[in-house]
């Protein structure tokens, strides 16, 4: 009898422990899907000049103006910002640029890039980043691009102590121009962004590969759009000689290009099992193949995803989707900003609002601008 009970206990242990371990692993995996985005909270901690490494919480950054806010960083990220004084200012600026650009690009869409209050412990872009959909792809790409762009510009502005202008262009010049000036240091910015942004990612699954690919796409759109900018020299502006340097593209151009890639994003799957087994040694040599075999494989500039997006029509607390109820729309448009698509067929209401604005402004010497206050009527359409 005693041996029988002992055997039963051993069998129950063997059966229950793997289930418990698997459950814990799955819960950890679920919680970690958006952990690589925790550093995004740098954009919400007040003025960039207040950003310092927290000596009490060695894995975080705090804001002296808001002591209750801490932004968790990975060990590699902490080492990187400590080794490059001034880089935190650039990272914070890059994140603010990314958020503003995301909101601009999607202002007329059902998903309009809503951001949460980081002080309340929420993810910057909400729970949508936990899904492997198009919107997450754009968010990862634009934030990585923001860091690369801001760090490259910070080098040429002397903000980061460990880098300066890019003086590599000292080769042959043109017939009426020569290399000179201060080029934006895209080489440093690209490598810094790659190390900082990608070191936040952990995993050995398709979501990990998706994040790395979209991070890289954002940086490539910055580095590949560098352009030559020149200044004329000569008597009375004759422009007999021009001095030229390499300049970053405007971040609006980067946002426009990534928005085009969002519209044509590729749904993908992993091409073979070997990708997962060799991710640590071959981090950027994975291969993705289209979900639809008739489509071309994604390039380095393409955005990729593997889950369908929600319709964003109705509120979904699990995904942090507020829905489109109460959103303004354009009743004369047949595009995504039109009332038919924005309101998801629910209809809309129209009202005339009276607003005040400055008008008839005149300049008075010296130095004052005087305006009248005018009352104007606007017709506003709101989704039901």
Image: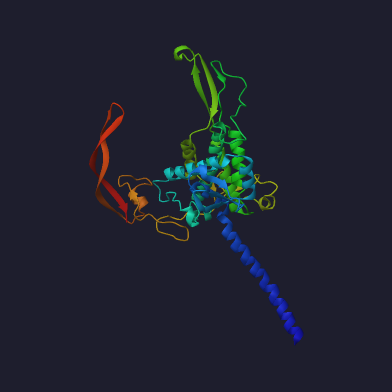
Q: Is residue 256 above or below residue 207?
A: above
Q: Residue at x 54, y 22 (%)?
A: 244
Quadrant for the C terminus, please: bottom left
Measuring from the top left, give residue 61's x and y in whole percent.
Answer: 56, 49
Q: Where, by quadrant of the figure, is residue 84 drawn?
A: top right
Q: Residue at x 46, y 13 (%)?
A: 238
Indicate how the structure is coloured in the image: rainbow
Q: Is residue 46 left or right of residue 186?
A: left
Work out which residue is located at the far right of the displayed protein and give it: 3
Q: Is residue 180 above or below residue 336?
A: above
From this viewpoint, is residue 267 visible? no
Measuring from the top left, give residue 95's x and y in whole percent.
Answer: 51, 44
Q: Residue at x 31, y 55 (%)?
A: 347
From this viewpoint, is residue 281 visible? yes
Between 341 and 209, which is closer to the camera in this rendering?
Answer: 209
Total marks shown come to 0
Q: Is residue 163 above or below residue 15?
A: above
Q: Residue at x 74, y 84 (%)?
A: 4
Work out which residue is located at the far top of the displayed protein and give it: 235
Quadrant for the N terminus, please: bottom right
Between 275 and 182, which is closer to the camera in this rendering?
Answer: 182
Q: Where, by quadrant of the figure, is residue 346 drawn?
A: bottom left
Measuring from the top left, give residue 71's x and y in whole percent.
Answer: 55, 51
Measuring from the top left, give residue 199's x and y in whole percent.
Answer: 62, 47
Work out which residue is located at the far bottom of the displayed protein and give it: 1
């Amino acid at each position: 009898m005693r041996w029988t009970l002992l055997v039963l206990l051993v069998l129950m242990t063997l059966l229950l422990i793997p289930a418990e371990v698997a459950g814990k692993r799955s819960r950890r995996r679920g919680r970690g899907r958006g952990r690589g985005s925790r550093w995004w909270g740098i954009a919400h901690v007040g003025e960039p000049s207040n950003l310092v490494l927290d000596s009490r919480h060695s894995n975080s950054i705090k804001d002296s103006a808001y002591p209750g806010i801490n932004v968790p960083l990975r060990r590699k990220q902490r080492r990187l910002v400590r080794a490059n004084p001034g880089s935190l200012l650039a990272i914070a600026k890059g994140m603010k640029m990314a958020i503003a650009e995301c909101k601009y690009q999607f202002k007329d869409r059902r998903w309009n890039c809503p951001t949460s209050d980081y002080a309340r412990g929420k993810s910057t872009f909400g729970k949508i980043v936990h899904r492997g959909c198009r919107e997450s792809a754009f968010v990862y790409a634009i934030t990585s691009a923001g860091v690369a762009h801001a760090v490259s510009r910070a080098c040429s502005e002397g903000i980061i102590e460990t880098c300066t202008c890019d003086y590599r262009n000292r080769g042959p010049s043109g017939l009426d121009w020569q290399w000179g000036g201060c080029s934006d240091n895209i080489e440093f910015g690209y490598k810094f962004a790659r190390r900082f942004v990608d070191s936040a990612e952990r995993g050995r699954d398709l979501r990990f590969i998706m994040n790395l690919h979209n991070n890289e796409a954002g940086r490539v759109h910055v580095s590949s759009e560098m352009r030559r900018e020149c200044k004329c020299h000569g008597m009375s502006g004759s422009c007999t000689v021009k001095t030229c340097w390499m300049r970053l593209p405007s971040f609006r151009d980067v946002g426009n290009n990534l928005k085009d890639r969002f519209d044509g994003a590729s749904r993908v799957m992993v091409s073979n099992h070997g990708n997962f087994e060799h991710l640590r040694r071959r981090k950027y040599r994975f291969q993705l193949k289209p979900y639809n075999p008739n489509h071309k494989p994604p390039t380095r500039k393409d955005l990729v995803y593997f889950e369908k997006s929600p319709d964003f029509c109705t509120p979904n607390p699990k995904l942090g989707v507020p829905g489109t109820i109460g959103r303004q729309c354009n009743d004369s448009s047949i595009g995504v900003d039109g009332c038919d698509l924005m309101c998801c067929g629910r209809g809309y209401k129209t009202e005339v609002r009276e607003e005040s604005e400055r008008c008839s402004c005149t300049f008075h010497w010296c130095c004052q601008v005087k305006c009248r206050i005018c009352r104007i009527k606007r017709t506003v359409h709101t989704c039901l």
